[in-house]
Image (tube, helix red, strand yellow):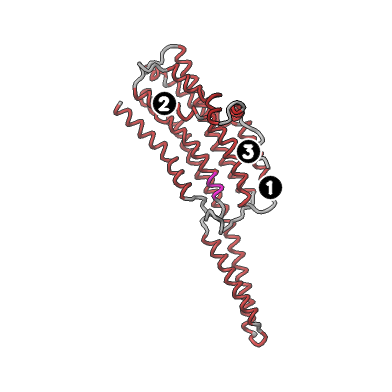
Amino acid sequence: MEYNATMVWFSRVVEYGRRHVENPVVASLLTMGWIPVISSLVAIDLAEASRAFLAVQFLAVLPVTFGPFIVWYYDRRVFPSFFQAVDEVVAPNQEPLIQEIADKYDRIISRYWWVTTLPFAVVIVSVFFVGNDYFVAEGITAVHEQVAYLIFFIYFALFTGFGGHAGIVMMATIHEFSDRVELVIEPLHPDNLGGLSTTGEFAIKTTVLLSTGSLGIPLGLQIATYTGAELLVYLGIGLYTVVLAGSFIYPTYRINKKAQEVRERELGTYQDRIRKLEDRLSSLDDNESNSDPSRQQQLQLEIQRTRQEFRDFRDVQLYPLSINIIIRLTTSVLLPIFFAIFEIFISDFF
């Protein structure tokens, strides 16, 4: 089945580049990735700008230079891979329902990307205008320099906004998936998570991709410090942080809650089965004259097997968190904190 029949326009641009250069990273750089680099070089006079500004500008340019590839990777790899892998954790004959959910959110990604991108973009572009005095102090004074730097901000806002869109779509996808699809827990699954690592991988890959936007935090904090536009800058950083945290916390909580319900139902079924088997064994013991030793032994073995299956279900870890996922999550969450501290460092020493 195909779970990404449509493509957001960023991905289409990268696919166009892949007609000439197969590697998607190179294709993204040749088609769109060069824009923030060139616009920054046109806008900024290296002789006039402070070292602190050059450092934070470099960090801000880095993630959006690879922005087209990041969008393409989410759209063409991360999103469809979730639906391709969930077969292991859903009940049989639910493929049409999975396809329906995949098609719905694939359309939302590709056609309605602007709905959630726009609020992020408005906040970020507004920062450009309120921070104009700071940019002038850093040598961005000529008209062509200001226009070039505005282009950088629009480009940065576009890809940062799409990151927020991707995070929100992922949370909505997991919400509907957990509501409508019947999960199956496999206690002996190799991931030791009942097969739920699929959800954790989807969440953490999205979170890691979103976390690259934290490279722009030092520039935002510099603007806030030198212009007094703290409220607007902190609003942008706050929106980003909420989506970043929510992109992992909500999906894992939602799937865990659904899995807990499935486990409670399965444990109840096993308890009923064990009681019935014990009642049958007891009836054989009460009627020893007609009891069949082989039948008694068979029932005892079946009780032991059912009890073991009960323990397997009871003990399986239902939070989709492996060590690998936890390490990547910790790194992603710490990135915004690290770059906030980095901004303080460069302010003091440059």
The extreme left residue here reads: 349
* Callout in the foreground (3, 2): 2
Whole-percent x and y of residue 139?
Answer: 38, 15
Instruction: Please tell me which residue lies in front, 196 or 226.
Output: 196
| Residue in view at x 54 percent, y 24 percent | 30
* Callout in the foreground (3, 1): 1
- Residue 58, labelled with which disc? 2
- Residue 95, labelled with which disc? 1
Could you classify mark 2 by the number of other residues whose Cα lies within 10 Å: few (under 14), some (14-19), or many (20 or more)? Answer: some
Which badge, 2 or 1, comes first in the chain's sequence? 2
Q: CA distance from mark 2 to mark 1?
A: 46 Å
Q: Is residue 272 left or right of residue 55?
A: right
| Residue in view at x 39 percent, y 27 percent | 56
The three-letter code of the residue at mark 1 reads: Glu
Q: Which residues are magenta?
A: 197-201
Instruction: Please tell me which residue lies in front, 216 or 301.
Output: 301
Could you classify mark 3 by the number of other residues whose Cα lies within 10 Å: few (under 14), some (14-19), or many (20 or more)? Answer: some
The three-letter code of the residue at mark 2 reads: Phe
Whole-percent x and y of residue 312?
Answer: 54, 62
- Residue 105, labelled with which disc? 3
